[in-house]
Every structure is written in structure tokens, then in C-alpha cells.
Image (tube, grey):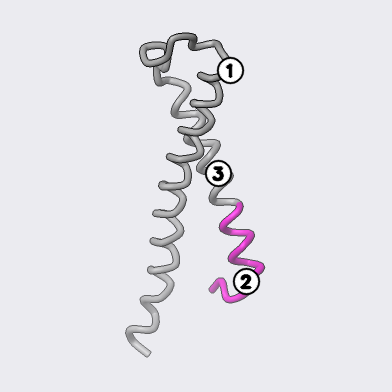
Amino acid sequence: MFDGLGQQAVIHIVVNVFFIGVTWWALQSFRFDLFVREPKGPKAKVLTIIVTIAIAQLVSQFFLDYLYSSQMLKYLWE
């Protein structure tokens, strides 16, 4: 289905950006002010960005692994 390297790269980028957005949106409900001294400070904002990227990376990697593995199932019956 996704044979070309260019197509895989585009899918990978789109999925990563999508999950970064979803993770950022979901983390807006999390109360970081309970864990940091200055919740409005630059360090807290950088921490929020790093946590967003880390969680989004894990989720997108899981999704992409599942997608690619499910595409390989067709070779079981060939």
C-alpha cells in the first residue's frame, strides 16, 4: 500500500504532527502548576513542550508500528 519511501516519509511526518497536536490539546487539562514552582515561567513552558513531544513520539511510534505490521499481514497468505 505504501511502497514508496517518499510516501512513508509523508505519512510519518503527518502522523507525528497530528499526535503532537492531540497530545498538546490533551495536556492542556493537566495541572502542571502542582508540580512546578512557576507555572507561567519559561522553564514550565519548555517542560510542557518536552513532555508533549515525548508522549506524542511514543503514541505515534505505536500507531505507525501497528499500521506497518498490519500491512505485513498480507504476506502470511502469499
As helix, strand or loop, the secondary structure at mark 2 comes to helix
Furthest-bottom residue in view? Answer: 78
Q: Are marks 1 and 2 in contact (CB under 8 Å)?
A: no
Contact between marks 3 and 2 (CB within 8 A): the answer is no
Residue at the right extreme of this rendering = 6
Q: Is residue 73 above or below residue 67?
A: below
Give the mark nearest the N terminus, 3 or 1: 3
Given residues 61 and 76, the one toward you in this image is 61
Determine the main secondary structure of the stretch shown in magenta.
helix
Residue highlighted by disc 1 = 42
Label 1 neighbourhood size at 10 Å, few (<14), some (14-19), many (20+)? Answer: few
Q: Residue furthest left?
A: 76
Per the image, the residue denoted by label 2 is 5
What residue is shown at x 44% (from left), y 9% (from top)? 37
Q: Is residue 5 magenta?
A: yes
Residue at 42% x, 20% y: name it.
29
Look at discs 1 and 2 and give the one toward the viewer. 1
What is the number of callouts on the image? 3
Position of 7 with respect to 74 (left or right) is: right
Image location of residue 62, percent across then percent down: 39, 54
Q: What is the span of residues highlighted in magenta in the rendered image?
A: 1-13
Quadrant of the image for the N terminus?
Answer: bottom right
**Picture quadrant of residue 17:** top right
Of badges 3 and 2, the one in the foreground is: 2
Nearest the viewer among 40 and 14 is: 40
**Which residue corresponds to mark 3?**
18
